[in-house]
Image (cartoon, rainbow, N blue to C red):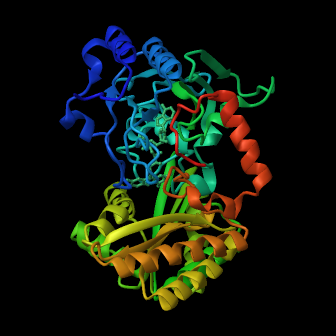
């Protein structure tokens, strides 16, 4: 019987509250057994609530019966965050996917958590507004998941990550209480900032049920520049030259040789002759964009670009950015297993990060593909291993520890946007000292005294 091991009174309570929206068939449970990390086991039950009151009831029952409760957005996370580690209930937010309000005067939107990022972007752009956070998963990941991971994307260089846009939250605590943090006003300094505490909390403190987001006016013009370079070193030099040009493009994305060739093959099109590609997006008023384009081209040329071209229009723009967004999928399509690390260093130290990657290739004999947000110093370092090669996997495990140690020594972070989940928790103490970890645990206990919410994550 599915749901086995769960207290009878608990399961009865769930069914009374949610009826047929309590799922227990093995085929249903299997759909919730993994996220994009691809590792995990099914829950005992899945519930698909469609309003806050139901979520409150589920949380209260789990709290009373000490049953693990794991919130799931769209399941695109890379660190196992939405996957149960101790069985229990998955709270699938898929029915809570409505845009409730777009307020053109106060420049904000109110959404349920499982609105897909790209759907919100299109809805606000239709009225001349703009929601900048643009993870490469924007057409599949949810705003709730983006908030819980503090997702970033190419545009974070100029516009910041998700946290800059979260004004207010409605959330359910593990005991079932509903709290409202922040407000629709742009300023609010009353009490501790619980809104920002919940941003990036990876489903371990509370269940986010409604999100108020700040919007900005949509920039009227944009242009994409594609710079093709002989290698990563020249592309990285161009990023430094750009910073000295004092331009702040909306995005600066770097794709190295292995990633580029995989993406081109996946898309069936050739976009650059060189072994590294920089994609740079400028946006703003038409005059400002034209000025920026001149400086961007100059920085790329000075750094040794083989070719610098401006996109020829919207279709070409979209094509170039589709290549970037598909890199991750393309690397997976190579048939190799991709172990993705979204490390981040202060942007002036990107050359040193690439030195570390070369060292890992040499010392561990691994194939490593890199791409990512060069403007933020947030580079995805992908260890590409043959799925059945145990020796290669063992070398990759040793290499990842060295990578994290080096990144921390460069005053960077082991995760810029994917979070810790269970995939990286063994490395938490490389970056945080024991006093900080103890404090985080006390915060967790204050929200969730019985440790039912997403157990086995972060710590
Ligand atoms: C191809 C690909 C490209 C990607 N590119 C990027 C990128 O550019 N930038 C980036 O930041 N990430 C990227 N990601 C990772 C992923 O898309 C993000 O982490 C995203 O924010 C996860 O959203 P989700 O809805 O899929 O959340 P899930 O995977 O379902 O959940 C992620 C975490 O959030 C928690 N959670 C979800 N909803 C709620 C809620 N309502 N309340 C409380 N907790 C909740 C879960 O418990 C879990 O811990 C990429 C992933 C893929 C597969």
Q: Quadrant of residue 394?
A: bottom left
> In the rendered image, is residue 396 in sight?
yes
**Picture layout, residue 426 above or below residue 140:** below
Asked whether 316 or 312 is in front, the reply is 316
| Residue nearest the viewer, comparing 372 with 368 | 368
Q: Quadrant of the N terminus?
A: top left
- Please indicate, yes or no, whether residue 255 appears anywhere in the rendered image: no
Residue drawn at x 36%, y 49% is: 40
- Which residue is painted at 46% across and 13% down in the image? 57
Measured from the top left, where is residue 332 in percent x and y? 30, 66
Q: Quadrant of residue 401?
A: bottom right
Residue 177's spot in the image, x, y percent? 59, 15
- Asked if residue 429 is positioned above or below residue 350 in the image, the reply reads above
231 up-or-down from 374: above or below: below
Q: Residue at x 58, y 53 (%)?
A: 156
Give the residue drawn at x 49%, y 91%. Answer: 362
Q: Which quarter of the frame holds ligand 1? A: top left
Of residue 246 and residue 326, the one placed in the foreground of this image is 326
Q: Quadrant of residue 433?
A: bottom right
């Amino acid at each position: 019987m599915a749901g086995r091991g769960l207290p009878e009174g608990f399961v009865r309570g769930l069914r009374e509250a949610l009826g047929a929206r309590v799922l227990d068939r093995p085929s249903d449970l299997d759909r919730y057994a993994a996220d994009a990390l691809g590792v995990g086991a099914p829950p005992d039950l899945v519930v698909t609530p469609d309003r806050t009151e139901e979520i409150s009831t589920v949380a209260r029952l789990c709290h009373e019966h000490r049953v693990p409760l794991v919130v799931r957005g769209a399941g695109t996370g890379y660190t196992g965050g939405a996957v149960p580690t101790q069985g229990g209930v998955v709270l699938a937010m898929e029915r809570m996917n409505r845009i409730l309000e777009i307020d053109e005067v106060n420049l904000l939107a109110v959404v349920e958590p499982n609105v897909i990022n790209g759907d919100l972007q299109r809805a606000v752009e239709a009225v001349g507004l703009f929601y900048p956070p643009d993870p490469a998963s924007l057409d599949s990941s949810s705003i709730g998941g983006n908030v819980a991971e503090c997702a970033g994307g190419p545009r974070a260089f100029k516009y910041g990550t998700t946290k800059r846009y979260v004004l207010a939250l409605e959330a359910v605590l593990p005991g079932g209480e509903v709290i409202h943090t922040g407000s629709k006003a742009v300023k609010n300094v009353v009490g501790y900032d619980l809104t920002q505490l919940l941003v990036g909390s990876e489903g371990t403190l509370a269940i986010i049920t409604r999100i108020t987001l700040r919007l900005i006016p949509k920039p009227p013009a944009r242009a994409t520049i594609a710079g093709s370079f002989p290698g990563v070193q020249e592309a990285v030099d161009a990023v430094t030259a750009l910073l000295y040009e004092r331009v702040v493009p909306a995005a600066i994305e770097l794709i190295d040789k292995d990633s580029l060739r995989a993406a081109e093959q996946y898309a069936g099109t050739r976009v650059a002759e060189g072994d590294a590609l920089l994609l740079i997006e400028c946006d703003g008023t038409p005059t400002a964009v034209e000025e920026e384009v001149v400086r961007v081209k100059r920085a790329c040329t000075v750094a040794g670009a083989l070719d610098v071209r401006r996109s020829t229009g919207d279709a070409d723009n979209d094509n170039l950015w589709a290549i970037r967004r598909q890199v991750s999928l393309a690397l997976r399509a190579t048939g190799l297993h991709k172990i993705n690390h979204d490390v981040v260093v202060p942007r002036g130290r990107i050359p040193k990060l690439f030195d570390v990657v070369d060292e890992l290739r040499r010392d561990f004999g691994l194939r490593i593909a890199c791409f990512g947000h060069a403007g933020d110093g947030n580079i995805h370092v992908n260890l590409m291993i043959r799925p059945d090669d145990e020796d290669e996997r063992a070398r990759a495990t040793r290499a990842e520890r060295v990578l994290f140690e080096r990144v921390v020594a460069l005053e960077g972070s082991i995760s810029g946007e994917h979070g810790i989940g269970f995939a990286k928790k063994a490395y938490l103490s490389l970056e945080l000292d024991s006093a900080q970890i103890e404090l985080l645990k006390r915060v967790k206990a204050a929200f969730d005294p019985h440790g039912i919410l997403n157990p086995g994550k972060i710590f």
